[in-house]
Amino acid sequence: MEKKEEDEFVSGTFKWKIENFSNLKDRKCYSDIFAIGGFKWRVLLFPKGNSVDYISLYLAVVDHSTLASGWTIYAKYSLTLVNQLDSSLSITKVTEHEFNSEESDWGFTSFMPLSQIRDLSETHFVNDICIVEADVSIRKCDIKILDQESGELLDFKGLGLIELAFHPLLEEVFLSHPILKEYQQKRSRTFVECAFTTFGRLLHFLKTTKVKDLNQDGYERLQLLWEELETFKFDLAWLQPHVESVFGMKNMAGRVGRMREDVNILEDEIKRRRAMLAAAELDLEKAKEDLAKAEQGFYKAVDVDCVIGYPLA
């Protein structure tokens, strides 16, 4: 996913490759989740149409129920059905929408007639593959509503209104990397506010999250924050190795988890075998008791010292 930035918008492009398009059985299909403007998005496709004889395509906000009350996100975006042989002949529709809790997805119910699929099979559906692109631009500082824990906003060094909790974290980084302050040059105040708010969120996450508390959601959260921060084109060569090492912990945690599972399996197996051994020992004691009783009865009933002999008549 490529990213770029403009003074008043944060933009990004997402590409979705759909294989075996003609064999899709679900009424609607969702793309992988991608992050633009500090929000999670996905593309929604109705391969047989949303109650119409057209392919239907929409852009949707993910996890919108977790956003702050009254949230809105204004976005300008395009959805494209890519011509795989000549991109200039791709089918693109452009729109803009203010997403909110009542309208968290928006797009084109009548994107392309289903009757055209056969005609476009050799250009847009090569080898039964469909490629959809979403190009999304988020307005100004709508990204401020991403964090539910947002607190008081105060001016930070003339850069703009930044959450108070982020001030000491940014101050600490500025002392070690003063060139970051120069980032405000030739940028609008709104864009700089967005950039340093995102920076503050990442620093806050790294400062407050314990390694033992990192789970799948935590790694996804860090990934979103890092991708969003990269959008603003900071020089982060000093921070990148540390962030990558945190992501490396995920692989290590996975190995540790698998090793823990192996240990648990072996412990359970030992318990099972010990239980089997204990049962076998009980069976052995019972067999010995039965043998002793049988031998005692046998010896009483028979003179074992006598000759067996044989009858003469």
Image (cartoon, helix red, strand yellow):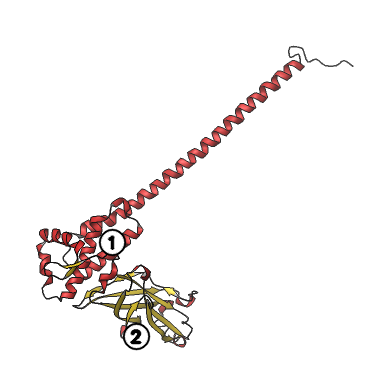
What number of labels is visible? Answer: 2
Tell whether 258 sits left or right of 184.
right
Identify the disc placed on residue 93.
2
Separation of marks 1 and 2 at Cα, in angstroms: 32 Å
Query: Residue drawn at (23%, 62%), measured in percent from left and top?
Result: 202
Identify which amino acid the numbered label 2 is placed on. Answer: Lys
Residue 93: image x %, image y %?
Answer: 34, 85
Q: Tell me the kind of residue under disc 1.
A: Leu
Instruction: Tell whether 136 sits left or right of 32.
Output: left
Q: Which residue is mark 1?
A: 222
Residue appearing at x 15%, y 75% in the figure: 189
**Residue 132 vertical position relative to residue 228 in the rendered view, above or below:** below
Q: Residue at x 47, y 87 (%)?
A: 115
Q: Position of residue 292 (x, y in %)?
A: 66, 21
Q: Quadrant of residue 155?
A: bottom left
- Secondary structure under badge 1? helix
Asked whether the beta carbons under mark 1 and mark 2 sit within 8 Å of each other, the answer is: no
User: Residue 142 bears which disc, if any?
Assistant: none
Asked if residue 232 shows in the view, the reply is no
Judge whether residue 5 can be spotted in this image.
yes
Q: Secondary structure at mark 2?
A: strand
